[in-house]
Image (tube, rainbow, N blue to C red):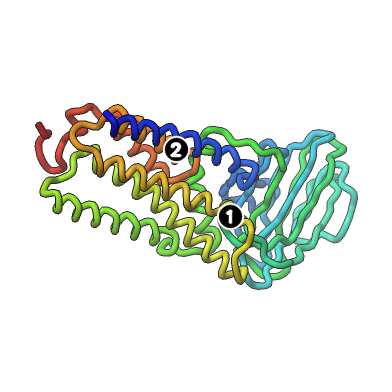
């Protein structure tokens, strides 16, 4: 009874602390909803930016020297148009952008290859590289080349064209400043983050190596513990351990990305304190899930199940476990007793 009460108290504590810290995350780090749409190679096939006052980060590439990527925005008079252009490339690549649409005052010279809508004004903003800045959520080191901030004075269709006169590479167009996430956008964030790491130019070995190694080592340790006990773990125990290792694997992944960014920047920055939240909390949640499984003796108690639900839910909020970890944690909490007690490879215990 004392152990169950202790687990329940820890569940409540994790929930309270986790929610408090998660409430700080959106304003601190989640300014942009990521999109990796592909396409946009012509004005006719421009990438549509829905709700252009909402904060988006659209990840794309310029693969050819004469390539242009187009975006279409439906704006109303009085809307706030904010655009930011950045790249993870460490060379001389400095993409530029053009804004075209009704009411746009002519400014600069568009390259001949950039298509202009009939009757639209055009503003060309040349890309210029500064020093690398740290983005704490992805995390990564990025070079901002263009920023634009204005109020739209005419309702209509606007186009943004991204092009380069300084080579090719990956770029991200940030649009809008109104922070807003749908449940789907939030839930699928772990998948988007993996694709962003790939967009940055990292190999799948670098992206998946740390979490895969973490999970493999953790499972090997769990097998050794089971052998020392002289009995195989039951299904609930294995699921709790796996959910925990997936969460810890997320922490390993983010750590590798942060260290890579620190190497580019030449050292640590203050923004890495935010990134540490995405390392320490998933690691703590993962350890707590693993401990819940390893300490379980006999059928999982109500306190065990509550702990797995709480930690699984908080993991979703932190994008920990690549969606699989929280799903396994929640599934473990809902297992019927007879199935939960099934020895892996054997018949139900008892």
- Which one is in front, 14 or 50? 14
Q: Residues within 10 Å of mark 1 (few under 14, many from 20)?
A: few
What residue is shown at x 44% (from left), y 47% (from top)? 282
Q: Is residue 176 left or right of residue 10?
A: right
**Tag of residue 14:** 2
Note whether 109 is above or below 30 in the view shown.
below
Residue 304 image position (x, y, % from top left): 30, 33
Note whether 265 is above or below 24 in the view shown.
below
Which quadrant would residue 112 be assigned to in this image? bottom right
Residue at the disc numbered 1: 273
How far separated are the C-alphas under marks 1 and 2? 20 Å
Q: Secondary structure at mark 2?
A: helix
Residue 256 image position (x, y, % from top left): 47, 62
Whichever of labels 1 and 2 marks the residue nearer the N terminus, that label is 2
- Which one is in front, 186 or 235? 235
Q: Where does the N terminus fall, quadrant-wise?
A: top left
Note whether 10 is above or below 259 in the view shown.
above
What residue is shown at x 56% (from left), y 56% (from top)? 139
Q: Residues within 10 Å of mark 2 (few under 14, many from 20)?
A: many
**Tag of residue 189:** none
What residue is shown at x 70% (from left), y 56% (from top)? 85
Residue 68 image position (x, y, % from top left): 68, 58
């Amino acid at each position: 009874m004392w152990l169950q009460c202790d687990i329940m108290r820890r569940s409540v504590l994790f929930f309270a602390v986790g929610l408090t810290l998660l409430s700080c995350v959106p304003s601190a780090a989640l300014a942009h909803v990521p999109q990796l749409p592909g396409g946009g190679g012509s004005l006719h096939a421009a990438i549509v930016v829905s709700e252009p006052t909402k904060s988006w980060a659209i990840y794309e590439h310029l693969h050819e020297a004469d390539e242009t990527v187009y975006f279409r925005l439906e704006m109303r008079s009085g809307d706030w148009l904010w655009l930011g252009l950045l790249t993870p490339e460490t060379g001389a690549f400095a993409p530029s952008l053009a804004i075209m649409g009704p009411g746009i005052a002519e400014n600069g010279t568009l390259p001949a290859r950039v298509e202009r809508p009939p009757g639209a004004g055009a503003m060309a903003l040349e890309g210029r590289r500064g020093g690398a800045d740290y983005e704490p959520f992805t995390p990564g080191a990025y070079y901002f080349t263009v920023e634009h901030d204005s109020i739209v004075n005419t309702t209509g269709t606007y186009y943004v064209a991204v092009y380069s006169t300084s080579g090719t590479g990956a770029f991200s167009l940030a649009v809008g400043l109104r922070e807003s996430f749908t449940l789907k956008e939030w839930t699928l964030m772990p998948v988007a983050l993996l694709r962003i790491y790939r967009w940055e130019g990292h190999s799948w070995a670098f992206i998946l190596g740390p979490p895969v190694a973490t999970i493999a080592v953790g499972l090997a340790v769990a097998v050794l513990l089971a052998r020392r006990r002289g009995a195989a773990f039951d299904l609930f125990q294995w699921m709790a351990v796996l959910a925990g290792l997936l969460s810890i694997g997320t922490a390993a992944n983010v750590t590798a990305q942060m260290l890579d960014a620190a190497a580019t920047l030449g050292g640590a920055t203050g923004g890495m304190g935010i990134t540490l939240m995405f390392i320490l909390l998933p690691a703590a949640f993962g350890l707590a899930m693993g401990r819940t499984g390893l300490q379980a003796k006999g059928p999982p108690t109500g306190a065990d199940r509550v702990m797995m639900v709480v930690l699984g839910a908080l993991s979703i909020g932190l994008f920990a476990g690549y969606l699989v970890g929280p799903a396994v944690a929640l599934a473990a909490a809902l297992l019927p007793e007879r199935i939960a007690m099934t020895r892996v490879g054997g018949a139900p215990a008892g």
